[in-house]
Amino acid sequence: MISKLNSKENVEKENKEVKDNKKTSKEEMRKKMMLVFGAIVGFILVTLLILFIFSMFTSKKYSYIEIENIMKEAAIKYYNDHKGRLPQNSETVEAIDEDVLVRNEYMHPLSDYLKEGVNCFGKVEVDYNNGNYIYTPYLECGSAYSTEELYKKVTQNKNLVVEGYGLYSMNNEFVYRGENVNNYISLDGETDEKSLWRIVKFTSNNEAVLIKERTDSYSWDDRYNATTQLKNGINDYAISRIKDELQKLYKLNDEKYGILSKKSREKLVSFNQCSGKRAQDYTANDNSAECSVLEQNQKIGLLTLSDYQNASTDTNCNSVYAKSCQNYNYLKTAYNWWLATALTEDTKSVYRVNSTGYIEKSNASNIVYVRPVVHLSNKAIYVSGNGTIQNPYKFR
């Protein structure tokens, strides 16, 4: 009996020792884990401290585009606080140097953003455009970097030609001519077909005239004509239906049917649409007839007859109805589309480009495709691209 009791006591004692050993092992394991965790936390804290100390003695160096954006945002804040200094009309341009923005604590000195050894001068110009303000930063860093407008990049002498396909200097403008020309441009930075336009020319004030592929088809004008006593339209652009339809297209924000995003409209400027009529026997392709009448301050319009003819390099494209105008002409399409130019000989006829690429007259009431035209500001800054469809010009 006594041996049984002793045996039971020994078993209980052994069980207790096992439990105590397990408890001790768990405690030791927990201590080790805490030590490891503490070491990791300590390492992270020391690393962060080292990085913080290092950052106090070193500063991030920015790209030139990032610095331009810093100047632009600083200028916006400055003029938000000094609204009275903003330009009040499109004829006035305000400019603020970076040292003014620095003195007023809207940004740090340029040296804080630049690589060692690089010296730059910066300014921001502010233009008034259709009720909005355009802020354009300029950075001049000598041979290292210089902000460049799109028109300067594209129209530099090395890009001009005097024969063949390419960019010509003519009529005090720079005009793209020929069948295969690299004049594609993206209005909003995207490269899908919907975003691509073609640069027709750069005007005498360095605005880029852009044309798009066809949109919907419309009548140029479908009103009753008292002269013809028929409802075959009136060929006066100022009161035409096509002018009204173009305004709707410009304002349309619908993703599916709109031709211009909010972003793409930011650098577009108003222009004077050449809407003068042209006689059928008039041979000067210099817009002298077309621009004898102007529709002031238009945001969107149509191409003139002269602009279409000038896109051809065929020397036989020398009259209104010359079929040679379809040759060597990138504006030629496989569909009919309206021009802005009407005939002087009657009150109902308008010029259009037909599906074979030459010009013909048409009743204004006919339904024909529309190729919208807009003007890009001469303040558009070149970003990238060479004008090919694979690598169109991009700007900001």
Image (cartoon, grey):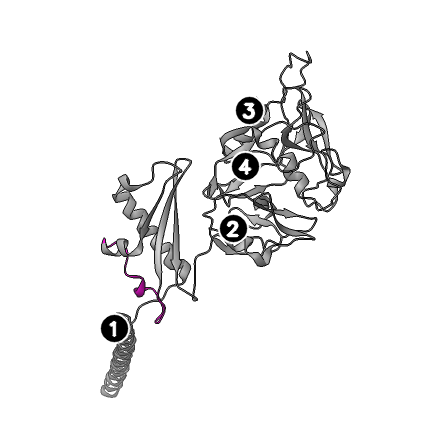
Mark 1 is surrounded, within 10 Å at the Cα level, by few (under 14), some (14 to 19) or many (20 or more) other residues, namely: few
Label 3 SS: helix
Q: Which residue is mark 4?
A: 258
Instruction: Please give the name of the residue rendered at 35% of the width and 63% of the height, measured from the top-left corner.
Output: 120
Of circles 1 and 3, which is in front? 3
According to the picture, the residue beneath numbered tag 3 turns out to be 238
Does dot 2 land on a helix, a strand or a loop? helix
- Label located before the other in sequence (2 or 1): 1
Mark-to-mark CA distance, 3 and 4: 23 Å
The disc, 3 or 4, on the residue closer to the chain's N-terminal end is 3
Label whose residue precedes the other's in the sequence (2 or 4): 2
Q: Disc 2 or disc 1, which is closer to the eye?
A: 2
Label 3 CA crowd tier, 10 Å (few <14, some 14–19, many 20+): some
Give the image location of residue 105, x and y in percent: 23, 55
Which callout, 1 or 3, points at the residue further toward the start of the chain?
Answer: 1
User: Which mark is nearer the camera, 2 or 4?
Assistant: 2
Q: Report whether residue 270 is seen.
A: yes
Question: What mark, if any, has residue 151 been given in the picture?
Answer: 2
